Amino acid sequence: MGELTAEAVVDRVVPRTPRLSPDGRWVVFVTGTVGRAGKYPVSALWLAPVDGSAPPRELVPAVAENHAPRWAPDSASVLFLSDRAERGTARLYRVGLAGGDPEPLTAAEIREHVPLPDPGQVVVIAPDERDRPADPRVRTFPAHRHSTWDTLARRDRVWSLDLRTGALRPLGDFGARHVVEVSARPDGGALAVLTWSVADRDPGLFTPGLHLLDPATGAIRDLGTPALEASSLAWWRDETGWRLCYCGLTPPALIGGHAVFDVDLSRLDEVGEHRNLTAGMSVCPVELAQVDGGPPLALFAEGLDTTVRRLDPATRRFTEVSRARGQLVSPTASRDVLAVVASTAAEPDAVHAGPPDGPLTRLGGTVLGEIRWGTQERLSYRAPDGLALDGLLLLPPGTTRDDGPFPLVTLAHGGPYDRYADRLNLGWYPSGQWLATAGFAVFLPNPRGGLGHGHAFATSVAGAVGGEEWTDLLAGIDLLVDEGVADPARLGIGGGSHGGFVAAWAVGQTDRFAAAIVVAGVIDWALLAATGEHTRFEAALGGPDDSTSPITHAARIRTPVLILHGEDDPNVPLSQAELLHRALCDGGVEHEFVVYPRENHSIREREHQLDVLRRTREWFSRRLTPGS
């Protein structure tokens, strides 16, 4: 049995975005390594028969970034985006099922594409070349409806591409609005179009629009204002005609769980009601999958697992079709076949396909060799106020609880609207398996505020981060100490993004931890609301004053802290890490501050990911081993 190396983690090839062919016989999917070796990522397209009768074969090699595969209506070819002609600029290509050199279809930059039932027509989302940011930029408030926002990004619009002539023409006129997503009605009729007011997330995201676009005439019908963070458009029909579903944030608060909304399109003279189909559910919809013209399927996060549910047209509720242990993502479906990317506690991400009610067949995937994995155990416990919580415990390979107590590292997840599913928890960040295979017990908690337990569970942290979500986490640590699993003298804590906030908060509240790691963590909510890309969401999380900001309590920190941050992070800007660094300097606290050049919120370069893995293991090893 081999040991897990940093190279095995970052060079691991992972699948994503499977797409089922219209005839239900094939699945095409993208593969790429976790870490990026050069300036630009590379990825390949693979093809597999749905029934698993043959192993997947490479359709387009990873000589460039090949992504966003979509099937032609006759299932005989795949359209996809690639930057093979000019790295960093995606254009549209087509390849047959036999593979070979892809055929270029456009010379223009393309963001997304939607093949129509007419085999000669494709709808594409692409920037308008005439759009350029103003110099100087002037933003006025209040902004009038038709005023121009000096956007940093070019708006995208809808275009029609005629594959027979190569002609690209504008389709519909949304004015200054930025097109985010397009979904074609299965019968070739209208297009559903999701837009923002402008291309910048703020204020674009906060004034979304949903529209119907006639691809023949360009006529537009507004469908009213969708929920914030609307995505995953899916058509279906009942006895009244066509309807449209999408996922979005449950109103009216900015913080909380997502829901599935349904829009009735039968009344041409009215804007249909956006009806919440998942109200009151104690589980969380994650993604929708359109199923020809029938009721859509949806993946739901349910505790540590995932359920497949189908919309019942009679009750307008989602009923369970099957249940999968661990995590399913990226669904694509027909009436008889569902394809997803799936992972369990001992199996890495792989494409699976089969009937929606199961079982799903694994269609190949990465083989990591004979790695001695840590044992992953499901946890169920209660918060101090009695709220039911779950999480995961990983023990070093070949050990049991009887071998404890162990040095315990608690890793808080990001979001906070996220979760630890019962999947193989392995990544470039300080992940569960990376630390467990180095001899640590690892606690992966799912405190309130996260995904998988319904809207009320998710919204409970709004304006109160660091409160009950913190005591939820402590309750799990105390349980593991009481049960003899964790050594109270050898406790560590870490996390990234919101998990980085939790780690920074923890060491400002207690000296129980012997070491901490803060990766791209939130240190000052008010500053983040002013400088980050999520603005009003961050203000709603942090609350009305500075009491929930770790910087307010930084003078209490005595725990050694490792700070890791990307230099070009727009989500949680580098200034957050600099605040913590300065505070620790002022307090004389042992710490290291590592800045990764060129990196965004997520570290992508291979050498940087290797550094994160090795540095985090070494940080905990020096401080949580006996005699440290």
Image (tube, rainbow, N blue to C red):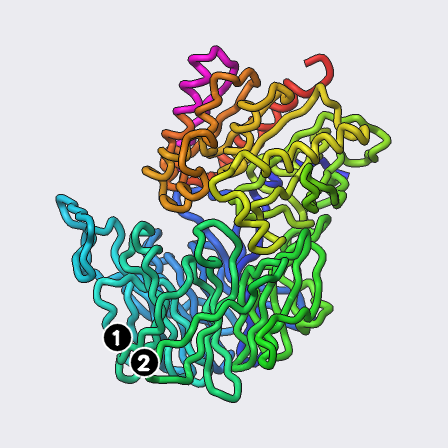
Q: Is residue 429 visible?
A: yes
Q: Say which mark, if any, is on residue 172.
A: 1
Magenta residues (range): 579-600
Q: Which amino acid, mark 1?
A: Gly
Task: Check disc 2 and report the residue beneath it.
Answer: 215
Q: Residue furthest right?
A: 402
Q: Is residue 321 left or right of residue 59?
A: right
User: What residue type is disc 2 on?
Assistant: Pro
| In this view, 389 is above or below 64 | above
Residue at 47 percent of width and 67 percent of height: 246
Find numbered disc 2 in the image and state the secondary structure of the residue it sits on.
Answer: loop
Which sits earlier in the primary sequence, circle 2 or circle 1? 1
Give how far across and how far down residue 161 sits, in percent: 31, 75
- The image shows residue 339 at horizontal and vertical percentages of 61, 67
Name above or below for residue 8 compared with residue 511: below
Magenta-colored stretch includes residue 548: no
Name, please, the residue furthest toward the left: 136
